[in-house]
Image (spheres, helix red, strand yellow):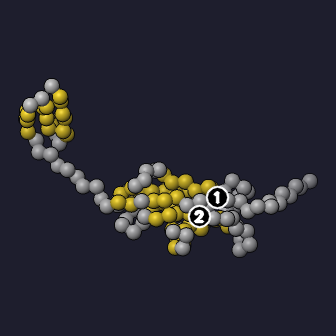
Amino acid sequence: MYCLSVLVNLPKPTLSKHPEFNPMYVGEKVSFTCDVTVSTGWKYQWYKDRSDRLPETSKTISIQLGPSTGGKYSCNAFRSETTLTVLSEDISLDVLGRLKKITLFKCLCVQQEDVQLFVVSNILMMYCL
């Protein structure tokens, strides 16, 4: 005996981002996952700012962040031309410029009033006296 279930409403995928940091920085990597809990066999469509369709069709995509990768990401899923989910909620991705490295010079000890600063192997340690 077989049972057939017919959905009245189209399924809505759940979109997640890893890591969940916001903002992120140029050079970092982010992954988005589009999950449909109803049935199996889905392929995925990815969108940036709801208008730019990305070429990937896998459940999870990874993006190396650059200056133009910030925006709102969303997805939907399909199994055929006639079986399509609604669009997921958007997830915002804010991308800022590269973090700057600060190099500290090595020295023995600097003392000024009630604060002592030690720089050892490019790590700054501060002690209040």
Graded by Cα atoms within 10 Å as few (under 14), some (14 to 19) or many (20 or more), the crowding at tag 1 reads: many
58, above or below 106, in the image:
below
28, above or below 53, in the image:
above
Q: Residue at x 39, y 55 (%)?
A: 24
- Residues 6 and 4: in front is 6
Please give the residue where the numbered disc 2 appears in the rendered image. Answer: 75
Secondary structure at badge 1 equals loop
Residue 62 x %, y %: 47, 60
Whether residue 42 is visible here, answered yes or no, is yes
Whether residue 58 is visible here, answered yes or no, is no
Q: Residue at x 56, y 63 (%)?
A: 74
Quarter of the figure that contains the C terminus: top left
- Residues 62 and 14: in front is 14
Q: Amino acid at mark 1?
A: Pro
Q: Residue at x 8, y 39 (%)?
A: 107
Secondary structure at badge 2 equals strand
Q: Amino acid at mark 2?
A: Cys
- Residues 70 and 6: in front is 70
Residue 30 x %, y %: 45, 57
Residue 121 placement, left or right of 9: left
Residue 69 x %, y %: 42, 66
Precedes in sequence: disc 1 or disc 2: 1
Residue 95 x %, y %: 39, 60
Please give the residue where the numbered disc 1 appears in the rendered image. Answer: 13
**Whether label 1 touches label 2, CB < 8 Å:** yes
- The answer to which image quadrant residue 127 occupies is top left
